[in-house]
Amino acid sequence: MNIKILETRVINLNDILHLYKTNGWSSANKPAELYRGLINSHSLVSAWDEKKLVGIGNAISDGHLVVYYPHLLIDPKYQGKGIGQKILAKMQEKYSGFHMQMLCADGKAIDFYKKNGFEIAGETKSMWIYKGNEH
């Protein structure tokens, strides 16, 4: 398998929606907002098997001190093959020196992020006003 990791904003909405729906993410129910949110992110990294979108991750940042990683999705058929690690590595090329890198994780994602250098943030608690239903 020859997966290419790209920083491109030329991604078809239907490809994005397929990836989000196959992962059961409720943001697929707001396609216009999802697309604009991804395209306007500080960074957008995608994984491709030929012309098939198999992974995507984005970052929101002030560009200097703090970065937040809201989304990292891999097509379920491609999970466990190191694609998520490659997307994170691409993000680290830009953000590794930042004072604070943040994300929210649950379920199996917690172990994935721990393996990739993230740790539970002390006694802090994630808080949100959330309109999704996948958690």
Image (cartoon, helix red, strand yellow):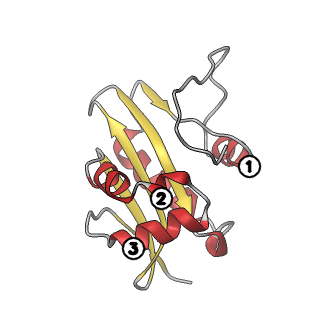
Q: How many marks?
A: 3
Q: What amino acid type is highlighted by mark number 3?
A: Asn
Label 1, on which residue?
Answer: 108
Label 3, on which residue?
Answer: 14
Q: Earlier in the sequence, mark 1 or mark 3?
A: 3
Please say if 110 is above or below 9: above
Disc 1 versus disc 3: distance between alpha carbons? 26 Å
Res 127 → quadrant: top right
Element assignment for label 3:
helix
Res 7 → quadrant: bottom left
Q: Earlier in the sequence, mark 2 or mark 3?
A: 3
Q: Are marks 2 and 1 in contact (CB under 8 Å)?
A: no
Element assignment for label 2:
helix
Q: Residues within 10 Å of mark 1 (few under 14, many from 20)?
A: few
Label 2, on which residue?
Answer: 28
Q: Nearer the viewer, residue 91 or 110?
A: 110
Element assignment for label 1:
helix
Between marks 1 and 3 in the image, the one whose residue lies nearer the viewer: 3
Please say if 135 is above or below 24: above
Q: Residue at x 32, y 48 (%)?
A: 37
Disc 2 versus disc 3: distance between alpha carbons? 10 Å
The x, y position of residue 80, in whole percent, is: 69, 66
Q: Residue at x 42, y 67 (%)?
A: 16
Q: Which mark is residue 89?
A: none
Q: Earlier in the sequence, mark 2 or mark 1?
A: 2
Q: Residues within 10 Å of mark 3 (few under 14, many from 20)?
A: few
Res 68 → quadrant: top left
Q: Residues within 10 Å of mark 2 (few under 14, many from 20)?
A: many
Question: In the drawing, does residue 37 fall left or right of residue 19?
Answer: left
Disc 2 versus disc 1: distance between alpha carbons? 21 Å
